[in-house]
Amino acid sequence: MKTPSGNKPFPSDSVSRDEDNALVRRALKGDRKAFEMIILKYQQPLLNYLGRMTGERELALDFTQEVFLKVYASLSSFQPRFKFSAWLFKIASNFMIDFWRKKKISAVSLDRTRDDGENSTSLQVPDADPPVARKYELAQIKKRIERALGRVPAELRELFVLRHVNEFSYEEIAEIKGLPVGTVKNRVFQTKEMLRGLLEGSS
Amino acid sequence: MNCLRPADIYLYLENGMDPAAAREADEHLALCPGCRSAFEERRALMDSITGLPDFEVPPDLAAKVLARIPPDRSSRFGRLAAFIIGLSSFFFGGLAYVILTGQSLTGFLIDAVRSAWDVMRDASLVFIKFAKLTVLGLDLLIRFIGEIGKGLARFGVLIRPEIYAACLLLFLVLAALLVAGLRRMFLHGEKS
């Protein structure tokens, strides 16, 4: 999965897993510092996921808090044999499903909210150091992709975000969503083709 | 090799193909301009979609979440507080009872002990009845399984061995599916 900073890799999958399990054990004993470390580790990937699912940064920030509270309340049900990050995103995914169900949002278009001024996405420019013109061009491309992504149905967008923003493996996504791996792969490929079509249409 | 489908190209780009299939795809891409062009298009898309920028996390997010978590009741302090509150309630409750009823403190204590004893006795009776019911239920279950076993043995004598094996296999598959479903339901974390 993508790292908290978005750039540096986790030490290794198994080390990260052991660390997570140790933090959960400590948090269950009432150690708030341990839960704070969990939040600091996962706030960035979780916000990236919820931000792209809602299309609004402020709403995504509220949801991030809610999901962490749900995670805290459910910590005792976490089984250490499963990967903590996958478990956390399963909770986040269920949270989004509940939200859509309550709001009865048709999962089709979220791009309108993405265009509404600075408050909508407030995305940062990547770390690389290209010349100003190239930087601008890159930012424009990323914006077009974000906009196109907002027009993809939510069920497909979610799988795409988990794969290409949060960088979960197909197997992990299958575990989070309770779908067969083949279905996940097909839907992610389908989303990419849809994005390609939307980008071609907008260029 | 046939022309590559978009799904094959994505699989290839993500190194998801097995080595033999990837070699075949390599060879095909070298020979087929159409697939080469489709491949380049998808590669450009993949380059663009990887590394989408992060949303900015406010520095006080963790503090905000922690502020909404109530103090842990299971902590040592929490347990001590609960004990002190319980003891104080008993003391002041008793005092109020003595003042209001005019009963002596000794009488109140005797009544309290008697009430506690009654509660314990009733709870023990309920527990014993529950234990008896559990034993009876288990006995019934064992007999039921025994009867099923006997029935299956008779059934096995009556039918051909292949059909018997097929039925057994079907039963095992159903049992495995049931176990897998229950495991998924109960052990896979939060469901809400």
Image: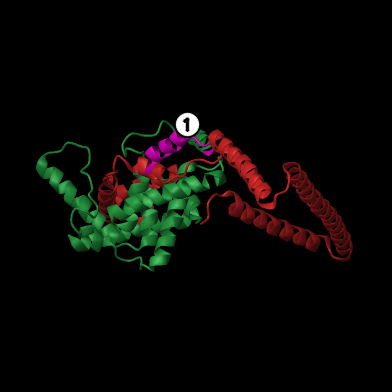
Chain colours: A green, B red
Specify whether B14 is left or right of B122.
Answer: left
Decide which of A182, B88 is in the foreground and name it: B88
* Residue A167 visible at all: no
Give x and y (percent) for residue A32: 45, 36
Whether residue B103 is in magenta: the answer is no
Magenta: main secondary structure equals: helix
Which residue is label 1 attached to? A15
Decide which of A50, B160 is in the foreground and name it: A50
Specify whether A50 is left or right of B41.
Answer: right
Whether residue A34 is in magenta: the answer is yes
Specify the quadrant of the image occupied by residue A54. bottom left
Few, some or many residues within 10 Å of mark 1 (<14, 14–19, 20+): few
Decide which of A154, A131 is in the foreground and name it: A154
Give x and y (percent) for residue A31: 49, 34
Residue shown at 56%/33% (left/top)?
B76
Q: Above or below — where is A119 with respect to A29?
A: below
Question: If the image is split into quadrants, where does the C terminus of chain A sit?
Answer: bottom left
Q: Could you tell me the amino acid type at mark 1? A: Val
Q: Which residues are magenta?
A: A28-43
Question: If the image is split into quadrants, where does the N terminus of chain A sit?
Answer: top left
Decide which of B31, A24 is in the foreground and name it: A24
Residue shown at 34%/56% (left/top)?
A53
Q: Above or below — where is A175 with respect to A6?
A: below
* Residue A5 visible at all: yes
Specify the quadrant of the image occupied by residue A189. bottom left
Specify the quadrant of the image occupied by residue B64. top left
The extreme front residue here reads B102
The chain holding disc 1 is A
Specify whether B186 is left or right of B71.
Answer: right
Give x and y (percent) for residue A2: 37, 41
Give x and y (percent) for residue B137: 83, 57
Residue shown at 46%/51% (left/top)?
A91
